[in-house]
Amino acid sequence: MRLELRGITKRFGSLTANDDISITVEPGQIHSLLGENGAGKSTLMNVLFGLLHPDEGEIIIDGVVTKFADSGEAVRRGIGMVHQHFMLVPVFSVTENVVLGFEPTKSLNRIDYKKATDDIRRVSKEFNLEVDPDAIVENLSVGIQQRVEILKALSHDAELLILDEPTAVLTPQEIDALMAIMRSLAASGKSILFITHKLKEVRAIADVITVIRHGKVVGTADPTASESDLASLMVGREVELTVQKDAYAPGESVFEIRDLVVRDDRGLVVVNGVSLDVYAGEILALAGVQGNGQTELVEAIAGMRPVESGTITMNGRDITNESPRKILDAGLGHIPEDRQRDGLVLTMSLADNLVLNTPRRPPFANHGTRNLGVVASHAEQLVKDFDIRATSVKEPASSLSGGNQQKVIVARELSRNIDFLVASQPTRGLDVGSIEYVHRQIVNHRNRGNGSLVVSSELDEVYALGDRIAVMYAGKISGIVDPSTSREDIGLLMAGTTAGTSSE
Amino acid sequence: MMSIDEAPILMTINAHRGNLRTKVIGGIMIVLAIFVILVFALGSPAGTHSQLTFDPVNTTDSPIRLGTLTVLTRWWNLILGLAMLGLGVEVFWRQPRRGVMARFGGVAVLLLLALLFWAVRTPGPSQVSYVNLTSIFVGSSEVVMVLIFGALSGVMCERSGVVNIAIEGQFIAGAFIGSIVASETNNFFYAAIVGAIAGGLIGLVLAFFSIRYLVDQIIVGIVIVTGIDFFSAYLNLQVFTPYPNLNVGNLAPNLPIPLLHKIPIVGPLFFNQSGFFYCMVIFVAVVSFALFKTRYGLHVRAVGEHPQAAATVGINVARVRYINVVLGGAIAGIGGVAFMASQGQFIPDYTSGFGYIALAAMIFGRWRPSGAVVASIIFGMTVYLAANLQEFSVPISGEILQMFPYLITIAVVAGLIGRVRPPAADGKPYIRD
């Protein structure tokens, strides 16, 4: 399929999410759409997929101007989309998910499951995407679920596949497998639109790269372009991709976890006997595919989740199962994974959010009465020091951009005199500029001789920050390695192969 | 190429957790069994008898007589208790993957039976005090039917992701309007149609506020129920008191099915019922079939589980929800008419809480029509026995027994008995982008 987007413009109120975007995807081509979070990639894809209607511009398929009333129509016209958050019903079987909306029927509107299953077997054989049609989706790993999504698109005879940030949840090995699938699909004549903000992947797979920024196409590039060129095109200025760190000089152990066991909300053991040490002056990066217990581990450290057994010690003090307030007072800084849920009270002002962890103490309050003047001046100071872009410290946190919201949290946690920092996915969803900034703040904290535990599912971040790298899999630490370890080896650890052993 | 499958450790822990729940259920069954053995069996003096009869009260209908069965209370309850114990031990020990709830339901029925035997025990053989099982079944079948209508309505709505807490209101509206129509036309079919329309319209109101304006569905539901409750009481005073001829709907006639209704026990229970009962049976079959076999049912379940996923393949989420909530409302409306027709007229507050018990039955039945039927039978029989226990001069207060369905429901919802999982998007509004 030859797809042409011509002058697509989409506005939400005063915000122009897509501004006169024109792109052409040739048959058999892997076309990368590179841009930061918030650059307008997802809006563009939703327009193309019929979920949103453009205000201006047209979609041209094989020379014919096309309009989609809804995404069902887009699917019927040969456009398939693999969403970043999978559009699969967890309790349905693979078959039910694949045929949903396009079910073959017998009399009485009954679904012809036999035909459906046969069709799936045929398509999965044709494209070499092996999957059990009768498996229940929630029992499949994320990589296989993604395969089901691709299969779903292909079985609706998609000629153009849109892959929206498909690698975000995959291990390096799964990413390799996905890329192999993409290549073979392109070779069989399918067009692929690959949306990402990851420079390495773009260079590895794309035939053509289109870069968008603030809703506009700012240029095209060859896959041979260097990472820093692509990054500066994407961000609009020179960026430093690596963070300067002082030489690694670990001090004594400041933070110890011993045999920690934690359950998740469903009561399942998701942290299963974890032991870790973090030394003064180092960043221990905890890598791992999301959902292997990292979230619960951090919550347990911050006192937000009960510890079943084991101990957590900070500076020689046992903080296991203490209340969050006591843990914070003991000197823990915490950058939570979900900044909007656990990091900020979105409806409260910037100034109030900046004292969220110390609202009752002098100088912010005296004898139970808040000292609003001090709160405001404190906020003004931090806004200046941490370069938070806000019109006023009185505006609600919800009015800030994601990057600035994260800066508020970083400012609040690091401006205080803390001993130990635990940061969970500290740069998720941030633009390159903000990532750079947050990384520098965390490294500064380390350079001052403090310990940090940084949890991240982005390997780039793990390498950029970690003095040592621990890998978590299925609730256990599958290995602790040096940052000189190769991506492949860390990938194996992320998939549960313990250090020292390796499979083919 | 190595494949990355689900974390094996987590899977084992998961399975272990499931076993624990099954064990708890088994444990509860064993406790109930021991209670029956100690109190109902060994608590009955050695010589006491319980009398059973299976013949319907109206004996002209049944040419085949089974006569009365006189049993020794102690030994029969011991047998029932041991059967319960067997089921409990089996669940506790073997932890079967399927059918745990069915076994639990069986234990509940055996418990009620043992309670009855114990309640009617007499020091020696007697002609006066006996349990007429058939009449208990037939008598409770009216309540069971109404609960099934309500639970089916709940299944329809909640499978598409809308919580219908307004079933009670739809019952009341159906009973009220159904009574007027039945009194005027003396035709229960028309009454059912009008009742369905009334219930459907209430469903439409619920759907409109919760889908169009994203108002919290529970709040809308409670507002509807409360409003209709008082409005019907008001109308009762203003309409039925001055014009009592509008509220003489009379009982819906039984429509015996030739030959089949003469079979003992089964005949009176299944083949000599009102049209509403047959209608209910058909509804259960149709809803079950539609939900799990048809294309439309797959769409409904997808919308209730993951509306975004449904939308991306071109399913109109709002439309599916509107249709299901209106149809569900119509079913509950017919249920209201059926209830009125089993009582003979509309009485304010007479449905007191049946809509909520139906909702509980739906949860207990795990959002499945078949499960809802099983749960409605258990709950319905309990409600019936609670209301009629005085007959047997049992030293248990009916009010206490009436708590039973709710206690079970709380245990179920709290995850104590089995794992219940509502549709993932149940009660959550779908906001397009």
Image: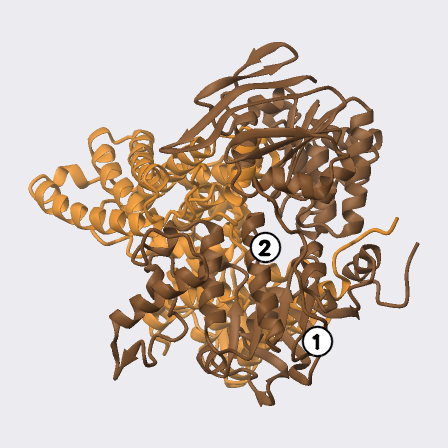
Chain colours: A brown, B orange
| Residue A17 falls left or right of residue B17 | left
- Judge the density around disc 2: few (<14), some (14-19), many (≥20) Cα neighbours within 10 Å: some
Location of residue A380 in the rendering, given as x and y in whole percent from the top left corner: 34, 63
Res. A68 visible in picture? yes
Is B6 situated left or right of B310 in this image? right
Q: Is residue B78 left or right of residue A361?
A: right
When the figure is inspected, residue B125 is found, relative to residue A463, above or below; the finding is: below
Which amino acid type is marked by label 2? Answer: Glu
Q: Name the residue under label 2.
A: A436
Quadrant of the rendered image containing residue B105: bottom right
Label 1: element kind:
strand
Q: Where is residue B370 in the image (x, y as percent from the top left)?
A: 55, 48
State the image quarter where residue B83 is shown: bottom right
Q: Circle 1 marks a residue in which chain?
A: A
Q: Which of A189 and B418 is in front in this view?
A: A189
Give the residue drawn at x 68%, y 38%: A149
Of residues B117 and A228, the one nearer the viewer is A228
Which residue has dot 1 on it? A274
Q: In this view, does B305 lie above or below A119?
A: below
Q: Is residue B252 above or below residue A334?
A: above
Judged from the image, the secondary structure of the residue bearing numbered disc 2 is: helix
- The residue under the point 72% across, 71% down is A247
Q: In which quarter of the image is residue B34?
A: bottom right
Q: Which kind of residue does numbered mark 1 sit on?
A: Val
